[in-house]
């Protein structure tokens, strides 16, 4: 893994809202094929940080580079064209289309056929869409209306959509939020397999520590907008600062989970 | 100099009524999220009732009492409307709310004529404010001075009401987060009802106070509502201070616009609005809106191209339609031609609304531009008909390209209002620029050439074009472009995240829809033989919306059926009754409340229910037959 080139380099990323410093000078790197987890308590700045990576949000200062190319402040669609796939905390799919059509739209965009007014969209990259759906285990659902899918299936569909442009980097914001425990493990195993096979770098945020410690190659920990630890799962687990800051608040987190109110 | 000061004061005086109406609209929107199109109607009823009361009761007490009583009476009507109608439609998308309240407006227009007659009524002068004040040789009506003072006073009263009373606190809270207010145990029903009544009271007061300045007539509702839309859009929906500032701004622009551009004074206001919307899309004092609500019961069943059998059925329908000249007379053929033209117009708007999710309230602009395109090409350039028909729609294209560029920067209610405003700009140019457009007299004498002159030939032409346009747009719906456009409608976030430039897709769709509407307009000019500003008017825009809605906004081309049914009904109604607006308005309200899926949408739903026994995945939902008439 150490020989892989640096895929994503984040340097001094900063964002404030009014007087609140949501993200302060965050720097980290991600190599191709590496699975990096970004964790931290609620309000640590994970989502803000995440949104700045693919252009949903513009940083006040700092740099984001993809394979050496500056992508700071560029639009999400431009960053997508450079090979960055994204899934959302709350799934965003096209409810009035079938599962296959959802993937096909992404492929239409990838093939730069958006302004084709006379062709038949149903015929565009039909096989490729089917292949992607097979890959995420949704092959049997291709003709189902997307609007009637279960939430876990929507998450898998999002993964298929995010893979449509053959990304070098996958950004997954709480990929398993709202899923049943069993489904969580399955989805992350699937993601990890695909990522390793295709040497895709994956950055994900997650509240489920089982998922994090099972799959992440490396973990970075964010608290109050600053990066407080970085390292292998073991290192982070043993880091006293993480335990104090993160797990300190984790008591509340655990209590909440015991009552069954998952994040 | 004195003249300019007087002009300025006149502007301020006009601002008072405008502010009253606009603040009412803003308060209602802030809490209920309904853009009340009927606000102009309440303003008008206020004026009429005030006229009657002040006419009946003499003296200063009779006059001022009459004005307040009128406003209270209208507030009571508003209360009933809210309880009977609006409570049923709070959850539906704003397009439907706008349409339902527009339906009310139509009904009121006829009712007012029924009760007070069609003539302009000149009201009493206000006791104590009958004279004029001399200002360096210029006379200022003292009533104007009263109004100038009244505006800030009302603003102050409203401020106190919202800052110092429990009710005001609740209203402000609900404006920020109505779900939270409901969760805190506030009875939302009565909060909404009271807010609506207060808003209507302000509108009616604005109307009642106008009677010493202006004659009361039955078209004053549309005039004020367009101005009020402009005011709240500039000031920011939901902001009372914004409404005040914008009312003054708009009134002054009107007052001085006449001096600068006497021919096209209305444009000035709309230009300012366009600039404000582009710089601050949510208005000067407004806040950015949360994402718009989704279409109701969004189709779970994805759209499908027609199956082989359905294509044959549609073709059969077209052939049947083509045989009409064999047994129908000239009048029927002219009506049928008009229906075919309106099919073109309706499907063009349907494409924008159903696929792009953009509800334009000014689509007639592009239809009308098509008609004027023909007028210019045929009358002034003297080009042959076939060339005119090909080039005329380019006017629609040009208009849609310019206005569409700005309009797609916005969405939801603001998109609707901006398109309405643009349509009004075009309308006012056509109306005021008499030397080019002939103004209200229009441009006459545009007759088709010999090959298309007979009713049957013209009908075949219109039918053929309508069929081609419908097919072309259907192809576009199922093309990669159509899917990508629909993707931007379904999820802006996701479409952006897969490399789709939503604004460019929407702009393209707007241009396609505008050009197609221009095609309809071009044919319409030849059908009527003349071109008038009405071809660009609000009522035509709303006709198109109703056709789309009636057909079913969630269908692929339900507008075809919607246009046929609506236009036929409309023509028949006008021939049967003098109260066509009343019936039509009631009809619109009825569709919105009980029939929001439209004819084709409802048929689809019934068909689907019938088939729901079959396992999911195999439901290739058939569309009902659509004759391409």
Image (spheres, rainbow, N blue to C red):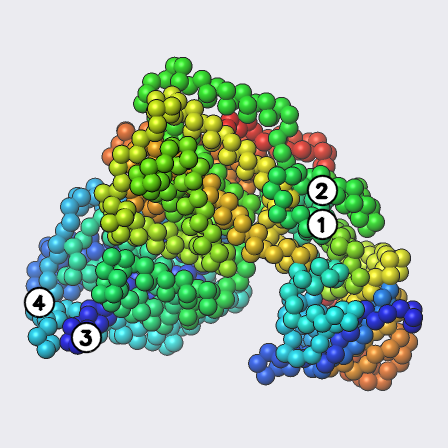
B105 vs B482, nearest the viewer:
B482
Q: Residues within 10 Å of mark 4 (few under 14, many from 20)?
A: few
Subunit under mark 2: A
Q: Residues within 10 Å of mark 3 (few under 14, many from 20)?
A: few
Nearer to us: label 3 or label 4: 3
- Which residue has dot 3 on it? B5
Q: Residue shown at 81%/59% (left/top)?
A: A184
User: Gap in Å between the C-alphas at discs 1 and 4?
Assistant: 74 Å
User: Gap in Å between the C-alphas at discs 3 and 2?
Assistant: 67 Å
Label 2 element class: loop
- Which residue has dot 1 on it? A111
- Which residue has dot 4 on it? B130
Both marks 1 and 4 on one chain: no
Q: Is residue A143 visible?
A: yes
Q: Residue shown at 34%/45% (left/top)?
A: B536
Horizontally, residue B304 falls left or right of residue B28, namely right
Label 3 element class: helix
Callouts 3 and 4 close, C-beta under 8 Å: no
Q: Quadrant of the N terminus of chain A?
A: bottom right
| Mark toward the start of the polypeptide (2 vs 1) | 1
Horizontally, residue B140 falls left or right of residue A248, namely left
Callouts 2 and 4 close, C-beta under 8 Å: no
Both marks 3 and 1 on one chain: no
Callouts 1 and 4 close, C-beta under 8 Å: no
| Mark toward the start of the polypeptide (3 vs 4) | 3
Q: Is residue B237 visible?
A: no
Q: Residues within 10 Å of mark 2 (few under 14, many from 20)?
A: some
Nearer to us: label 1 or label 4: 1
- Which residue has dot 2 on it? A124
């Amino acid at each position: 893994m150490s020989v892989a080139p640096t895929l994503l380099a984040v340097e001094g990323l900063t964002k404030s809202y009014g007087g609140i410093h949501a993200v302060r000078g965050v720097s980290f790197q991600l190599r191709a094929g590496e699975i990096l987890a970004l964790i931290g308590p609620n309000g640590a700045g994970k989502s803000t940080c995440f949104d700045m990576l693919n252009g949903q949000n513009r940083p006040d200062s700092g740099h984001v580079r993809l394979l050496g190319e500056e992508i700071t402040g560029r639009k999400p669609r431009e960053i997508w064209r450079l090979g960055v796939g994204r899934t959302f905390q709350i799934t965003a799919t096209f409810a009035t289309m079938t599962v296959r059509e959802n993937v096909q739209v992404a492929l239409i965009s990838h093939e730069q056929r958006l302004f084709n007014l006379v062709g038949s969209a149903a015929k565009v990259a039909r096989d490729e869409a089917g292949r992607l759906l097979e890959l995420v285990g949704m092959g049997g659902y291709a003709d189902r209306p997307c609007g009637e899918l279960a939430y876990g299936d929507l998450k898998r569909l999002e993964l298929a959509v995010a893979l449509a442009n053959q990304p070098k980097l996958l950004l997954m914001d709480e990929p398993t939020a709202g899923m049943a425990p069993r489904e969580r493990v399955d989805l992350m195993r699937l993601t990890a397999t695909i990522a390793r096979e295709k040497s895709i770098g994956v950055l994900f945020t997650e509240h489920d520590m089982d998922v994090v410690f099972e799959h992440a190659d490396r973990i970075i920990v964010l608290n109050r907008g600053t990066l407080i630890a970085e390292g292998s799962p073991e290192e982070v687990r043993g880091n006293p600062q993480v335990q104090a800051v993160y797990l300190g608040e984790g008591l509340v987190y655990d209590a909440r989970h015991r009552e069954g109110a998952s994040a | 100099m004195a003249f300019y000061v007087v002009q300025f004061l006149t502007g301020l005086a006009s601002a008072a009524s405008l502010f009253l109406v606009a603040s009412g609209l803003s308060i209602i929107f802030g809490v209920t999220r309904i853009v009340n199109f009927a606000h102009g109607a309440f303003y008008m009823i206020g004026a009429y009732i005030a006229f009657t009361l002040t006419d009946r009761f003499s003296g200063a007490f009779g006059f001022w009492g009459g004005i307040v009583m009128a406003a209270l009476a209208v507030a009571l009507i508003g209360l009933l409307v809210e309880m009977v109608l609006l409570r049923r439609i709070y959850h539906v998308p704003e397009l439907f709310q706008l349409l339902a309240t527009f339906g009310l407006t139509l009904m009121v227009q006829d009712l007012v004529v029924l009760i007070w007659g069609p003539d302009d009524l000149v009201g009493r002068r206000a006791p104590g404010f009958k004279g004029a004040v001399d200002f360096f040789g210029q006379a200022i009506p003292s009533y104007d001075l009263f109004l100038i003072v009244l505006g800030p006073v009302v603003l102050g009263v409203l401020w106190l009401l919202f800052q110092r009373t429990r009710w005001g606190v609740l209203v402000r809270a609900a404006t920020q987060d109505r779900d939270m207010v409901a969760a805190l145990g506030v009875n939302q029903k009565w909060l909404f009802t009271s807010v609506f009544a207060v808003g209507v009271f302000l509108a009616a007061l604005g109307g009642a106070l106008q009677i010493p300045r202006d004659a009361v007539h039955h078209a004053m509702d549309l005039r004020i509502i367009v101005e009020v839309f402009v005011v709240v859009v500039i000031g920011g929906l939901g902001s009372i201070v914004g409404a005040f500032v914008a009312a003054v701004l708009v009134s002054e622009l009107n007052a001085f616009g006449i001096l600068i551009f006497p021919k096209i004074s209305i444009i000035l206001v709309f230009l300012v609005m366009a600039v404000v919307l582009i710089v601050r899309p949510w208005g000067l004092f407004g806040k950015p809106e949360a994402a718009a609500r989704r279409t109701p019961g969004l189709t779970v069943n994805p759209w499908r191209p027609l199956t082989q059998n359905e294509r044959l059925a549609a073709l059969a329908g077209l052939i049947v339609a083509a045989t009409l000249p064999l047994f129908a007379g000239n009048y029927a053929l002219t009506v049928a031609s008009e229906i075919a033209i309106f099919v073109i117009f309706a499907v063009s708007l349907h494409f924008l609304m159903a696929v792009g999710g953009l509800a334009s309230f000014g689509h007639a602009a592009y239809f009308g531009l098509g008609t004027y395109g023909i007028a210019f090409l045929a009358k002034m350039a003297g080009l042959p008909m076939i060339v005119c028909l090909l080039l005329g729609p380019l006017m629609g294209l040009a208009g849609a390209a310019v206005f569409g560029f700005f309009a797609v920067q916005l969405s939801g209610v603001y998109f609707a209002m901006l398109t309405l405003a643009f349509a009004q700009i075009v309308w006012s140019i056509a109306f005021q620029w008499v030397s080019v457009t002939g103004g209200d007299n229009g441009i006459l004498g545009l007759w088709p050439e010999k090959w298309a002159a007979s009713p049957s030939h013209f009908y075949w032409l219109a039918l053929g074009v309508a069929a081609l346009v419908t097919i072309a747009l259907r192809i576009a719906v199922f093309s990669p472009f159509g899917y990508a456009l629909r993707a931007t409608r379904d999820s802006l976030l996701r479409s952006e995240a897969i490399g789709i430039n939503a604004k460019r897709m929407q702009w393209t769709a707007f241009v396609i829809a505008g050009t197609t509407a221009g095609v309809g307009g071009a044919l319409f000019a030849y059908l009527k033989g003349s071109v008038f500003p009405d071809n660009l008017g609000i009522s035509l825009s709303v006709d198109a919306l109703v056709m789309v809605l009636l057909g079913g906004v969630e269908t692929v081309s339900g507008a075809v059926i919607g246009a046929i049914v609506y236009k036929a009904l409309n023509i028949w109604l006008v021939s049967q009754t003098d109260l066509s607006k009343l019936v039509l308005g009631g009809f619109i309200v009825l569709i919105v409340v009980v029939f929001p899926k439209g004819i084709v949408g409802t048929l689809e739903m019934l068909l689907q229910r019938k088939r729901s026994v079959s396992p999911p995945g195999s439901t290739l939902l058939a569309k009902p037959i659509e004759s391409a008439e």
